[in-house]
Image (spheres, grey):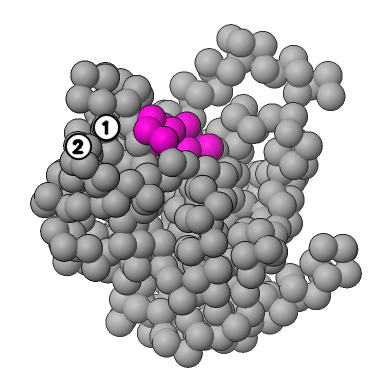
Amino acid sequence: MDDSDLKHILTTVREFVREQVVPRELEIEDTDEIPAEIREQSAEMGLFGWAIPEEFGGLGFNAYQDAMLAFELGYTTPSFRSLFGTNNGIAGQVLVNYGTDQQKQEWLPKIASGEAIASFALTEPDAGSDPSGLTTKAVKDGDDYIINGSKRFITNAAMSDVLMVFARTNPDATGTKGISVFLVPTESQGVTVGPKDKKMGQAGAWTSEIFFDDVRVPSKYLVGGQEEVGFKAAMASLNKGRLHIAAMCVGQATRILDDSVEHAKVAKQGGTPIGEFQLVQALLAESYAELSAAREMVLAAARRWDEGADRKLGPSSCKLFASEMLGRVADRGVQVFGGMGYMRETSIERFYRHARLFRIYEGTSEIQKLVIARQLLKGAHKDVHSA
């Protein structure tokens, strides 16, 4: 894809987000659902498959293009991006990177078109940011596997058609060993999706528990055709996902800053626009500086990803900095809005609640610090800075 094609796509998405999605944010908040027509238009635009290879009907975006798109998608409620985020990200990338030819041919075209929704079923009650505590089991039974266990906080589970289920196939293995991943159609007998979770923010992005009771899965749905590729597949998907989430944080912070600046221009105290007060100006200036730093950081890391130069240190550093940055920008936004920033009808109040989750999912800030430190101790930073 050349620069002109990318520019056209980004312009189209920007217009769609700001003209069609932003005006309906309160409706999405109240109904906890993305309107059907927005979903249909998103599918027509190719948003369910921007990161899926072109040979399977996707747009084949690289990491840099993905980040540029995420800046635009992040400008509105994050539940909009969540609608198709798992297809392109953590779920879809498991198949893109590790699926057999048969698995790719069967599922990726449907995932790219939006005909099928894929979910990434890794997290469990005792296995979140650290999957080594995973207890869901898959036991070989003839040409099939029998899966038992449960998952929680699974995005899009309630609307999913296929699940990427991580389960331990080696009962004697511990930690990150012995974990495999399976393609499990959600309609399979023994699969039960729980009710939608009631969350602090991000209304319209559905998460649920999933229960597996003697779910029989044919061996052809063992991703990669072999056992124990699960942990590697999960980490590869999460690493790229962290870069995307960092870019989403930039988009969210951009929206918050834009709304804060506009409010500072029109809101008055004592007849004077609050934007003329230096302490308010300081809040805006700090947010812009941090936002700009995060944006450039994400783009630089995306380029290194595409070059194959760094696929661990950069993504974790970006996810840590950008998600923490977003929290600070959101907090300043509420401060600029004052009492109105605490009211449900304002965008700032919603984005303040949305922001809190970015420091948790796809690896908490604490996990990112561990990843970064381990990479530093291996000398990875020297390779990055010498490039």
| Sequence-wise first label, 2 or 1 | 2
According to the picture, the residue beneath numbered tag 1 turns out to be 169
Amino acid type, residue under disc 2 in the picture: Val
According to the picture, the residue beneath numbered tag 2 turns out to be 139
Q: Position of residue 187 (x, y in %)?
A: 24, 68
State the quadrant of the N terminus. Answer: bottom right
In the rendered image, which quarter is residue 75 located in? Answer: bottom right
Residue under the point 67% across and 11% down = 379
Q: Position of residue 201 (x, y in %)?
A: 34, 62
Residue under the point 60% across and 29% down = 312
Amino acid type, residue under disc 1 in the picture: Thr
Where does the magenta region start and end? 226-236
Q: Which secondary structure type mostly characterizes the magenta part of the structure?
A: helix
Closer to us: 352 or 335: 352
Closer to us: 199 or 352: 199
Q: Is residue 258 left or right of residue 370?
A: right
Closer to us: 16 or 86: 86
Q: Position of residue 348 (x, y in %)?
A: 47, 66
Residue under the point 69% across and 30% down = 310
Residue under the point 62% across and 27% down = 313
Asked if the residues shown at circle 2 and circle 1 are in contact, with their CB atoms under 8 angstroms apart, the answer is yes
Residue 235 belongs to the span the image colors magenta:
yes
Report helix, strand or loop for mark 1. loop
Are there few (<14), some (14-19), or many (20+) residues within 10 Å of tag 2?
A: some
Residue 315 in view in this figure: yes
Q: Is residue 176 left or right of residue 250?
A: left
Are there few (<14), some (14-19), or many (20+) residues within 10 Å of tag 1?
A: many
In the rendered image, which quarter is residue 255 located in? Answer: bottom right
